[in-house]
Image (cartoon, rainbow, N blue to C red):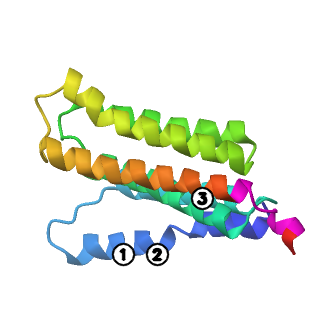
Amino acid sequence: MKTKDYLIVVLAPVPALLMALMGNLFIEGWNWNPGSFVFAWVVIAGATFVYKRVATSPAATLAYRLGAGLAVLAGFLITWFTAAVQIIGAENPGNVLYLGVILTGLTGVGLSRLRPSGLAKAAFATAAATFLVPVIATIFWPADFSPGVEKAFILNGCFALMFAVSGLLFRHAAGQPSGATAR
C-alpha cells in the first residue's frame, strides 16, 4: 500500500466520528465516552485497511473486489453489532464466539496470500463459523437470547450468507484473468 492509502485508512473514520460527536453534543441520551470513539475509529480504520489491502492486490478483478467488500462489510457489521447491542443477548457469553468468526476470516486472509481461491476458502470457513455461533450458544447458554432465538438465527444467517456469497465471488474471480493481465 502507498502512503496515500494509509492516509485514507487513518481518515476514513472521521465522518462517522464527527456524526457521533454531533450526537453527543445535540442528542439527549447519546453518550459516547472517549473509549467509544477510539473503538469506532479502530473498527472503521481496520475494515478500511483490510479492504484496501485485499482489493488492491494484483488479482483484483471486479468479482474479487466485490467479494472483498462483502466480506469486510459482514465482518464490520458483526463487530459493530456485537459491540453495540450484542447479537445473541446482552448477557449471553456466546457473543464472544463472534471474535472467533473475525479471527477465522483474518487468519484465512493471511493464509490465502490474497489469492482468490484461498480467499474463497477463507470466506466459506468464515460463513461456517458464523453459522455455528448461535447453534453453540443455544446448546451451552440457552437462557439469554434477548432479541429472541429466531431473530438471532435470522440475523446470523444474513451474516453467514454474506460470507458465503463473498466466497462465491472469490471462486468466480479465481476463474478469471487477474486485473493486471486482463488489461
The residue segment tinted magenta is 173-181
Where is 75 relative to 21, above or below?
above
Check residue 79 for magenta coloring.
no
Q: Name the residue under label 3.
A: 169
Where is 9 relative to 168, above or below?
below
Q: Mark 2 points at which residue?
A: 15
Which comes before the other along the chain, label 3 or label 1?
Answer: 1
Check residue 179 for magenta coloring.
yes
Amino acid on which the number 1 mark rests in the picture: Met
Do the numbered discs 1 and 2 sit on residues whose CB atoms are within 8 Å? yes
State which quadrant residue 113 falls in.
top right
- Give the image location of residue 125, x and y in percent: 52, 37
Which comes before the other along the chain, label 2 or label 3?
Answer: 2
Q: In which quarter of the image is the N terminus?
A: bottom right
**Residue 109 in view of the camera:** yes
Seen at 27% across and 31% down, the residue is 135
Amino acid on which the number 2 mark rests in the picture: Pro
As rendered, which of 16 and 162 lies closer to the eye?
162
Q: Is mark 2 on a helix, strand or loop?
A: helix
